[in-house]
Image: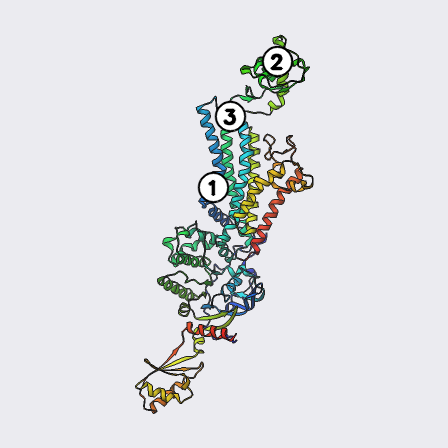
Amino acid sequence: MTISTVADAPPPIPAAPDAGGRVTDHRGSWVPNGAMIATRFMELRKRRGLMAALILVNIGIPVVFLTVRLIAHAVAPHSYGPAGGYDIFSSMVAGVLFIFGFIVAATLGCTAGSVDLTEGMFRHLVVTGRSRLALYLARIPAGLAIIVPLVAVGFAFVCTVCVLAAPTQLSFNNVNVPVGLSKPALETWAAGHVDEVICNFGFNIGPNSDLLQVVNSVPCGGGNGPSVKVGPGAPTSTPVSRAQVEDAARQIAALNYTDYSGRFLSPSNSLMVKSGLWIELYAAVGFLIGLGLSSLMGQRTVPVILLIVLEIVLTPLLSHSPITHLINLQRALVGIAVTHFEPGGLPSVFGGTHNGATGMAGVTESTTVAICVVVGWIIVWTALGAWRMVKRDA
Amino acid sequence: MSTITIDEVAPPNAADSQWAVETHGLTKRFKDNVAVDGVELLVPRGCAFGYLGPNGAGKTTLIRVLLGLTHADAGSMSLLGYPVPHHRDQALARIGAIVDEPRFHGHLTGRQNLHILAAAREPAARGRIDASLERVGMIQRADDKVSKYSMGMRQRLGVAACLLGDPQLLILDEPMNGLDPGGMLEMREMITSLVAEGRTVVLSSHLLDEVERTCDAVAIVDRGKVIRQGPIAGLLADSAFDLQIDCSTPDRAGTLLAGTQWGTGVEVGPDGLRVSLAPGTERAVVAEMNRLLVEGGVSVYRLQEVHASLESWFLEVTTRLGAGQ
C-alpha cells in the first residue's frame, strides 16, 4: 500500500480569526454556568407529557381527593365529614405526598439523566468542549427547580384545605369533643356528657371493678352498649346515683386523655413546616438517585421501574419488622432512613416506628446512621452517574 | 476553584500549526475489530477536505476519536495545533462538528436546541444563533419543533449548531444526507463560502460527486486505514486515463496504433478511437501518437485526455486493494 503525502496540497489559507480571541468561558471547569442550568430547566419544563404526568400525580391526586370531600361535605354534612383537618392532613402527607413525591421526583431525575443520550443531544454537547461533569451537574439545580415547587404546590394545597376546611369540633370516637382541653377540663366535660362518654369512649375494666356496675347502668341508644370489656362473673346491675355515673365518666375520660391529646382540629404551623421540609427532602433525594441511576444505565424506563419497586414494594416490605440477619440492609434503605426524620405528629409511613415514636415494632436506627444513609445514597448515585457520563462513549 | 483560559495553556505553536488535523498512528479497537488502524492523516488548514470510504471503513469512528466522543487506543493527534486529548476543550472551542445523523430534542424548537448548545459554549455563541440559522436557511422554521423537521432540515440545523462557536474547523459527517438537489447545492455553496473565509471543512461523505465538486483534497479510508490522501487533481492525475482521438478513419488509426507499445489499450467505438494509457504517462506520448497517425494518412481533428472521475478512481482504488487482499 502506498500512502501519498499532502506536501503538494493546496497552500494553507490564513485561518479564520480565533473565535472570540481569548476564550475565557471556563469551558474546562466542572462548574456549570447559569445559562446551562437555565436551558436545562427549559428543556425539562417543555416536556409537556412528563410535566402533565408529574402534576397529575403530585397535585392532581390530592386536589381530586380533597375536592370530592369538600363537595360531599357541602352537600351532605351529616353523612360526610369535613374535607380538612389534622387527620386528613397526616394521612395525605404520610400516605400520598411522601411516597408519590419520591416517585415523581425519581421519574424527573431519570428523565434528566438519560434524555440527552437517548435523543442524540449528548454528542452535540460533548463536541462543544464543555466539561462533561459540568454538563451533568447542570441538571441538578435545573431538576430541583422543577421538583421542589411541584411538591410544594401539592403540599400547599393540602395544607390550605386541611386548615380552612378543618372540623369545628374534634370527633373523638364519634363524639364531638372540644379541642385542646387539659386533662381536668376533659374530665369536667365528660361529667356533663356521661352517656356519650360511657357509650363511645374505649376503656377496659375488670369484672370486679366498681366501675362495671355503673357503666352497665347507662342505657346506650340503639341497643349498643358501651365499648366495655367485661370479665366473667360480672355482677347484675343495681341502681346507681348520678354522682357515681359522672365519676365513672371522669375516670373513662382520664383513661382516654393520652389518645385525645394527640388529636387536633387542624395541623399546627410547626407540623406543616416540618412536614413540608420532610417531603421536599425525600423528593430531592429521589431526584438525585434517579438522575444518577439513569445516567449510569443510559436509559429512563428501567431506572424508573426499579425506583418505583424500591419505593412501593421493597421499602414497605423491609421496614415493617426487623429481620435479624438483614437489619443493616434494612437500615441502609433510603426510605427507612428518611422516615427517621418524619415529624412526630404524623403516622408512620411504612408502618414501623419513627423518631422514637411508639407504634409497630419497625426498623429503628440512630440519627447519625440515618444521616449517613441519606447522604451516602446521594453521593454514591451522583458519583456513579457523573463517572459514567464522563467515561461514556458519545 | 481554579479556572483556566485557553490562551494561558495552549501550546505556543498551536495557532502556527499548518495542519487543521494531524494524526499519527491513530488506532481504535472494538475488541478484535480494528476500526481505525494506525491512521496517518494530515488535513491542511483553510481547505475543504473530503474523507471518503466505503461503509464500515472507519470514517465515523475516526471522527469520534478526534472529537473525544470515544478514546483512542494508540497514536497521537492534534486539532488546530492543540494536542488532544490534553487540550481537547481548547481545541473543541474552535471546532464545530456533526457526527452521524444530527439529532436534537424533538419537543423543542430549532432555536431552543441551539440555545442549549450555545449555553455550553462561550457567551458570544448566544448572539450567533440567529445568524447561524439565517446562514443555513432555517430562520423561517427556527421556531417550529424539531420533531416536525425533515431529515434535510435537521442537517441544516446541525450545521447551524456547528457555526455557533464561529469555528476554525468544521467536521461534517455526511452533511448532504437527506438534502434535495437544491439543498445540496446550497450546502456546497455554504461549504465553499466557509472555506473562503479561511475555515477548514472536513467533509465525510459517500457522495463522491459532491466531494469532487466541493473539496480540494481527499483521504480515502478503507478497513480502518488511510490508503490515499492528497489534492484531488493530483490523485486523479496519477491515475490511468484515456486518450479520445477524433479522426477521419478510426479503423485505420486503430490498426496503426495496434502495432505500437500502446496497442493493448486501443479500442474503436462509435465515438471514435479511445486509447487507455497507464498512470504517469507523459504528454509527449500524445504528440508521438499524433505524429504516427498523421504520417499514416489519418487526419486527426482532436486529441483529448479523459481522466477518471473521483468515483471511478475511488472504486478502482478500493476494488484493487480489496482484490489484492
Circle 2 Cα neighbour tier, 10 Å, few/some/many (<14 / 14–19 / ≥20): many
Q: Is residue B88 above or below residue B261?
A: above
Q: CA distance from mark 2 to mark 3?
A: 35 Å
**Mark 1 chain:** A
Find residue A216 and name its label.
2
Q: Residue furthest front?
A: A233
Residue most extreme to the bottom? B295
Question: Which residue is under mark 1?
Answer: A53
Work out whether disc 3 and disc 1 sit on a shared chain. yes
Q: Earlier in the sequence, mark 3 or mark 1?
A: 1
> What residue is rendered at 45% in x and 81% in y?
B280
Between B39 and A72, the one lying in front of the other is A72
Kind of residue sitting beneath label 2: Asn
User: Which sits earlier in the primary sequence, circle 2 or circle 1?
Assistant: 1
Taking the view exactly as shown, the residue that stands out farthest to the left is: B248
The residue under label 3 is A166
Looking at the picture, how far across and down is residue A41, in whole percent?
49, 46
Disc 2 is placed on an element classified as helix
Where does residue A388 sit, x and y in percent of width and height? Answer: 57, 53
Q: What amino acid is at disc 3?
A: Ala
Q: Position of residue B230 (x, y in %)?
A: 47, 73
